[in-house]
């Protein structure tokens, strides 16, 4: 028997939406303030997943100025058997201040999963987490959370359904309110419709994006309801099965629901798929906290559970419980194989850099990042400081392990103290740490030092500076369970020299950024990055000869 080990997609890959077309499975995940937008992964066995493309990459949606954790939320991937088109519905969260949650929802389509994807088609601004259901009669429906802003009404709102016009955009008629959740956990969101044996099944996320997260289900003979709740009165999947009454709470961390007996936490927001042989699985998000802490640097990752249908037509986990597992049984006939690791090595000797490189806020353009100006190097032209939500020149990859090292070699010749280049760890514009070269007027030389941002507060490591006269250095950050060690060397044959050790970077996590007490501050994830800053004349650049991540 082949075992699937969770997470199936490590690092920031939340809100997974899974489909099967023929023999191939695809998953789309959220990307928030990162571009390109909407990651799409491919698998032939549900065990190994490869990033193959993005749905948004050419400023179809502009993310400059996006506050954490707004941006691109909860893409829902579907396939219309009639037109043979792929569809993705998603929300662009523009504002979360005042708990208004102003969000515009769109759909894009393509004849092939790798695109080209259409321009976004506007759907609605009623809330967020839209999903498209293609019914057998040729009609299409959107399900979405209607966000509640009024005092005295149950937050976060109702799950609503309407017929949708996929040709011209918008809805047909009006939205119908169908439920505020199927259990007492509250915070119903991410509704998705499936049809089986004459029933419409409505799968929703519940309990908030924290430790009480779960997946709920209801069913109806009619698409607009009324929907009958699962008879258990509890989520069908969760990391914390004990009962919770939390109606009216719009969203919260629910740290009291942490399950000390499970590696996997926050299981919820699920998407259902059937194999060719009639087996059923749910892809869902999960988190893995640091040992002894409630912080999750890797953000929300993608996991999968095996499911079954009961004799009375209800979906449930294959083992009869509702506790999400780290290991589950793969589909029948899956060959035993090792899971592909998430290590990265790119020496920039081809005409394309690794697809896993992403950029916060702005899109990747040859005007600031390219392989053409110097053969065998990735050249990054310096732009805004990393506090900027507009144009930071950062090329990042998802952190996918709680224990790893990231390395690079950079050549950089600054002539002003606001020109820098180097290697770092990044969560968002207010939270990062940066191991970099910079010009020192005092020493009239290029020096190596560290700059840190924690909740928007700037800290210079003024007691940690060394001369790098040649402007060429290899940099390494070793990350172990939220603690970082910074090392460097001037020649490849040299041993690594310690720059500074035991730096607490655990705040670069969902719970460590911007959160009010009892809430999750963000729900994106930690990235490793190379980048450059030029707040002087925008005429400096850095050349990187390789980038490597080794997970352990």
Image (spheres, rainbow, N blue to C red):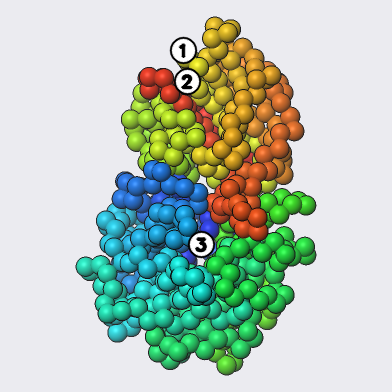
Q: Which badge, 1 or 3, comes first in the chain's sequence?
A: 3
Q: Residue at x 31, y 66 (%)?
A: 123
Q: Residue at x 52, y 84 (%)?
A: 218
Q: Residue furthest front?
A: 151
Per the model, the C-alpha gap separating discs 2 and 1 is 7 Å
Q: Are marks 3 and 2 in contact (CB under 8 Å)?
A: no
Q: Is residue 190 left or right of residue 477?
A: left
- Vertical placement of 416 versus 339: above or below? above
From this view, report whether residue 366 is shown above or below residue 275. above
Q: Nearer the viewer, mark 3 or mark 2?
A: 2
Residue at x-position 44% and y-position 61%: 100
Q: Which of the image's four quarters has the C terminus?
A: top right
Q: Are marks 2 and 1 in contact (CB under 8 Å)?
A: yes
Which quadrant: the N terminus? bottom right
- The quadrant where residue 462 appears: top right
Q: Report how far apart the C-alphas of labels 1 and 3 lie in the structure.
A: 45 Å
Label at residue 415: 1
Tell me the crowding category of disc 2: few under 14, some 14 to 19, or many 20 or more residues within 10 angstroms, Cα based: many
Residue 146 in view of the camera: yes
Q: Residue 326 in the image: x percent, y percent?
A: 68, 63
Please tell me which residue is depicted at 46% across the width and 70% down the height of the picture: 150
Decide if residue 267 is in sight here.
no
Which one is nearer the viewer's eye here, 460 or 370? 460
Secondary structure type for disc 2: strand
Q: Which residue is mark 3?
A: 15
Give the residue at mark 2.
419
User: How many residues crowd mark 1 within 10 Å: few (<14), some (14–19), many (20+)?
Assistant: some
Image check: 50 left or right of 65?
right
Q: Marks 3/2: CA distance?
A: 38 Å
Indicate which disc, 3 or 2, sits on the residue closer to the N terminus. 3
Tell me residue 531's x, y (percent): 49, 30
């Amino acid at each position: 028997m082949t075992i699937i080990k969770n997470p199936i997609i490590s690092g920031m890959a939340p809100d997974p939406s899974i489909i099967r077309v023929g023999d191939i499975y695809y998953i789309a995940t959220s990307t928030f303030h990162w571009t390109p937008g909407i990651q799409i992964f491919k698998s032939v066995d549900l065990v190994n997943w490869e990033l193959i493309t993005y749905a948004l990459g050419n400023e179809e949606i502009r993310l400059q100025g996006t506050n954490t954790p707004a941006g691109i939320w909860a893409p829902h991937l579907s396939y219309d058997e009639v037109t043979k088109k792929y569809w993705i519905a998603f929300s662009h969260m523009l504002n979360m201040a005042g708990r208004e949650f102003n969000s515009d929802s769109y759909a894009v389509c393509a004849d092939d999963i790798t695109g080209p994807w259409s321009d976004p088609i506007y759907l609605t601004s009623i809330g967020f987490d839209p999903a498209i259901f293609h019914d057998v009669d040729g009609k299409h429906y959107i399900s979405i959370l209607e966000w509640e802003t009024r005092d005295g009404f149950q937050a976060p709102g109702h799950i609503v359904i309407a017929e949708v016009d996929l040709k011209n955009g918008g809805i047909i008629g009006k939205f119908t309110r169908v439920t505020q959740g199927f259990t007492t956990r509250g915070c119903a969101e991410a509704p998705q419709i499936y049809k089986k044996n004459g029933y419409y099944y409505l799968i929703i996320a519940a309990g908030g994006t924290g430790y009480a997260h779960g997946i709920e289900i209801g069913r109806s003979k009619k698409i607009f309801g009324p929907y009958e709740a699962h008879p258990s009165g509890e989520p069908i999947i969760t990391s914390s099965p004990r009962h919770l009454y939390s109606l009216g709470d719009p969203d919260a961390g629910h740290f009291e629901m942490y399950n000390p007996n499970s590696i996997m936490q926050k299981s919820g927001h699920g998407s259902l798929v059937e194999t060719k042989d009639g087996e059923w699985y749910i892809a869902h998000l999960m988190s893995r906290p640091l040992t002894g802490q409630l912080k999750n640097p890797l953000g929300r990752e993608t996991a999968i559970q095996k499911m079954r249908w009961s004799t009375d037509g209800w979906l449930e986990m294959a083992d009869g419980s509702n506790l999400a597992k780290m290991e589950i049984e793969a589909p029948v006939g899956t060959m035993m194989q090792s899971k592909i690791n998430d290590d990265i090595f790119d020496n920039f000797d081809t005409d394309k850099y690794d697809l896993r490189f992403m950029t916060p806020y702005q899109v990747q353009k040859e005007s600031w990042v390219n392989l053409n100006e110097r053969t065998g190097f990735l050249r990054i032209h310096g732009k805004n400081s990393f506090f900027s939500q507009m144009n930071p020149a950062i090329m990042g990859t998802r952190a996918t392990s709680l224990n790893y090292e990231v390395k690079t070699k950079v050549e950089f010749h600054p002539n002003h103290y606001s020109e820098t280049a180097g290697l770092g760890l990044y969560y968002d514009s207010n939270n990062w740490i940066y191991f970099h070269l910079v010009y020192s007027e005092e020493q009239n030389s290029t020096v190596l030092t560290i700059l840190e941002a924690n909740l928007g507060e700037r800290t210079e490591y003024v007691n940690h500076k060394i001369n790098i006269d040649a402007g060429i250095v290899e940099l390494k950050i070793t990350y172990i369970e939220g603690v970082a060690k910074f090392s460097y060397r001037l020649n490849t044959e040299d041993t690594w020299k310690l720059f500074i050790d035991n730096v607490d970077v655990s705040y670069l996590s969902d719970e460590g950024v911007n959160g009010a007490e009892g809430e999750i501050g963000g729900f994106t994830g930690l990235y490793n990055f190379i980048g450059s800053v030029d707040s002087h004349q925008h005429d400096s650049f850095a050349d990187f000869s390789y980038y490597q991540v080794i997970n352990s």
